[in-house]
Image (cartoon, rainbow, N blue to C red):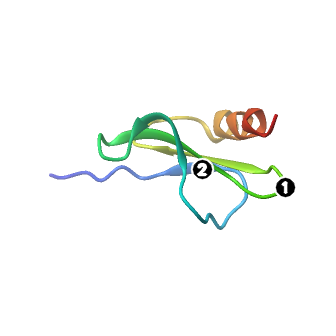
Amino acid sequence: MDRTPSPQGGGPLPLSGEPTSVVGSVAEGRALLTWTRTGGRSTVVAYGVRKPVTALRALAAQART
């Protein structure tokens, strides 16, 4: 059975533009990705990585500073 990882996110939606890879890559099937908007708000998405949403929100807040 082929399992496609389901992404989890913390931060505002919708996302636009290209993300910055924090760890890993989507091609590898495991990644933490960050999108930063004008104004400094960030969204972090875990792809194929089990991370609590609270941890993703904390990472998004760190990315803003």
Whichever of labels 2 and 1 marks the residue nearer the N terminus, that label is 2
Give, as a three-letter code, the residue at label 2: Gly
Q: Position of residue 7 (x, y in %)?
A: 47, 51
In front: mark 2 or mark 1? 1
Q: Nearer the viewer, residue 5 or 24?
A: 24
Say which residue appears at 25% left-offset and 51% top-offset.
3
Tag on residue 5? none
Left or right, 19 with respect to 40, comes to left
Q: Which residue is mark 2?
A: 9
Quarter that holds the C terminus: top right
Say which residue appears at 65% left-offset and 67% top-offset.
14
Q: Position of residue 58 (x, y in %)?
A: 73, 34
Q: Nearer the viewer, residue 37 or 56?
A: 37
Say which residue appears at 32% left-offset and 43% top-offset.
29
Q: Nearer the viewer, residue 19 or 46?
A: 19
Q: Which residue is mark 1?
A: 39
Q: Is residue 26 above or below residue 14?
A: above
Residue 20, by quadrant, is top right
SS category of the residue bearing label 2: strand
Q: Nearer the viewer, residue 43 or 57?
A: 43
Total numbered circles: 2
- Does the CB distance between marks 2 and 1 fall below 8 Å? no
Give, as a three-letter code, the residue at label 1: Gly
Residue 57, by quadrant, is top right
Q: Position of residue 6 (x, y in %)?
A: 42, 53
SS category of the residue bearing label 1: loop
Q: Residues within 10 Å of mark 1 (few under 14, many from 20)?
A: few
State the residue lying farthest toward the left.
1
